[in-house]
Image (tube, helix red, strand yellow):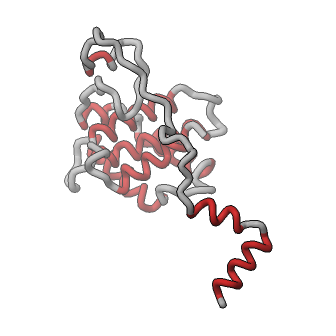
Amino acid sequence: MAERCMSFALASSGQANTLQSETQDVSDSASNTRAPSPELPQASAPFQPSQLASANAPIVFPFTAGVPRISTRQLLSHLPPRDEAWALVEAYYRYCAWHHDVAPKPNFEKTFDRVYTLSNGTSSSPAVNAQEIALVFIIMAQGTLYNIEMPAFDSSADHWLHLSELALVKGDFLSNNTLHGLQTLHLMAHMRL
């Protein structure tokens, strides 16, 4: 009875032919559905990774062959004075984070304090992960980019973004994921929207 109702409903809506053709083997269609791969010349040289990294090649984060190695101390040396950095952080939370708070301010304040304590060389707290430093840099980049009190398209936003990328790579974020790294990647995605 249920099969008869189903076939009647399908027939009445014009879908019976579609159902039959989908369940039957149709042999008149081509068996090859994609174009063949291009032939490589026989004389081509084997791939060399150094071909990717040329002096004029753009940096494609995070998959660059020539990512510069940077120490934590070098990353921290690029931090601006604490009050200037905090002004950028405040700008981020005032002008950007009101619609999506990726890094809640109370939690970020703790990270910011730990990073700046380490940069002053007076750290008695646990070690700071490079991904935490990356989060500080990307929030400063966002604060620079969206701060209406600063010139439009201020180049320091790109500087902070680049430092954030270097810190993520230093923190080995592809293999060693942290919440700070995830927050940083999320904010990086918003940099160019």
Q: Residue 149 lies in what quarter of the image? A: top right
Q: Which residue is drawn at 78% across and 70% down?
A: 13
Q: Where is residue 26 in the image (x, y as percent from the top left)?
A: 56, 53
Q: Is residue 39 above or below residue 142?
A: above
Q: Which residue is drawn at 26% across and 50% down?
A: 176
Q: Which residue is drawn at 54% across and 39% down?
A: 191
13 lies left or right of 3: right
Pick the residue in front: 75 or 50. 50
Q: Residue at x 68, y 62 (%)?
A: 18
Residue that sits furthest to the top in the current view: 43
Residue that sits furthest to the right in the current view: 12
86 lies left or right of 97: left
Q: In this view, does 187 lie above or below 81?
A: below
Q: Position of residue 42 (x, y in %)?
A: 29, 12
Q: Position of residue 36 (x, y in %)?
A: 45, 29
Q: Is residue 82 above or below residue 1?
A: above
